[in-house]
Amino acid sequence: MLAFWDGDKTFEKSVSNREGQATFTFYEGPPSANGTPGIHHVMARTVKDIFCRFKTLQGFQVKRKGGWDTHGLPVELQVEKELGITKDDIGKKISIEDYNRKCRETVMKYKDQWDDLTRKMGYWVDLEHPYITYNNEYIETLWWILKQFYNKGLLYKGYTIQPYSPSDGTGLSSHELNQPGCYKDVKDTSVVAQFKVKRDTKSEFLFKDVDREVFILAWTTTPWTLPSNTALAVGSKIGYAQVNTFNPYTFKPVSVVLARDLVAKYFSEKNKGAKVSEYKPGDRVIPFEVVREFSGKDLVGLRYEQLMPYLQPLYDVDKAFQVVAADFVTTEDGTGVVHTSPTFGADDFRAAKQNGIPPMTVRDEAGNEVPTVDKKGKFISAIGEKLKEGVKKFSIKTHKPLGADDFYVKNLPMRMKAIRITRIRMSSYQLFLRKRTKLSK
């Protein structure tokens, strides 16, 4: 049958003898020829072929243009592995021209296998004139389309939160990160940070009959985002409690706010009988007492002191560092209060937009608005200097002396601002499957 189709040019005739008829145009979502085809490609192509043959039988002229996806990252990683280089070596150990040339060679490495499979499974598609995404004709077509969007006023400049791989210096598609195995329970550092409430008319109810500073407790498994905190999110219908107790690290008296249903998680029932007035710094038993309960809506609009006053937002500073209501807050984990960093979290970004909260960003040398962590996962120097000071001030032990440019997201010292630090919590984390590394956003 395959030989007959080839000799008779059956596929080509099925297109040419319907010239002038209504068209049904098919552009294949192209595979990448730097990897070998698998059974899932056969299954997907079978479905594609059914629709094209059906429309042909209905009398449509069905032009089926094949293509090759030469997207960058998989090819780049393959080439870098073969050559034993990293992104930093491009332009140094290998010229950009040679690197691009090697990528172009590698991206079509298994084209013959793909062509053979295409023919053997009887999949009808034009591979003699494919579109290839690295060709100038294809690229210029996309530019033209984008210009049409721009001319119609459909393009605007803005910011969104995207998954990012510091190890490879690139953003990643949501499709790739929804594959099986992308989420895995890993051992991670979680922090319960304390945010000092500013005393004013709105917050006065928290200071009634309280002889100590008042803090809102927020839990996070991404403590490296805390320097970029600009808001705290609560559930407006969630019940909260205010508890008088002592900080286990500094031994200072504090009054803390957290979800009522989570009080027992942080304060042991066996300590309930201990008297707050009799506590001495260093005591193993830390007493506590619930002084009042209230609804989350009572917290909305409260102002608090910036947790790490290393930088200020570029704009709308007066709107930062306040409590907002958000629909993603629950009492399943944490404290019922979500540390919110619009610079890094997708939910955080959405909640901040809705409430006019600015992100914590800076200007780079070109004047662009950028986050406080660079593309390698390292804090910018302005934050690094402050972290260095904190390490010295609080006598925090590090594996080596750290300079301002040595602070990465994985080694943020937090004891100075925390009420609890846990290093064994199992957290579901999004991984970059090609390298099994954690992602930033």
Image: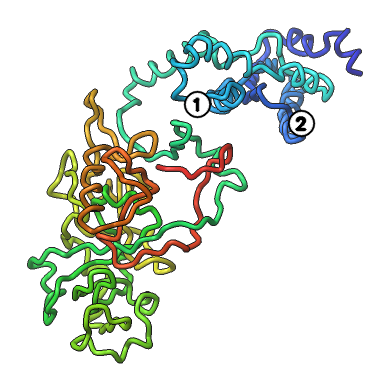
Under circle 2, the secondary element is helix
Q: Which residue is mark 2?
A: 42
- Cα separation between marks 2 and 1: 34 Å
Q: Which mark is residue 86?
A: 1
Residue displayed at 26% across by 53% down:
391
Q: Please, is residue 311 above or below residue 109 in the view?
A: below
Residue displayed at 77% across by 10% down:
12
> Cβ–Cβ below 8 Å for labels 2 and 1?
no
Report crowding for label 2: few under 14, some 14 to 19, many 20 or more residues within 10 A (C-alpha): some
Report crowding for label 1: few under 14, some 14 to 19, many 20 or more residues within 10 A (C-alpha): some
The quarter holding residue 407 reads top left
Q: Camera-side residue: 45 or 430?
A: 430
Residue 134 position in % (x across, y down): 54, 14
Residue 344 position in % (x across, y down): 35, 44
Q: Please, is residue 392 above or below residue 436 in the view?
A: below
* Total labels drawn: 2
Under circle 1, the secondary element is loop
The quarter holding residue 395 reads bottom left
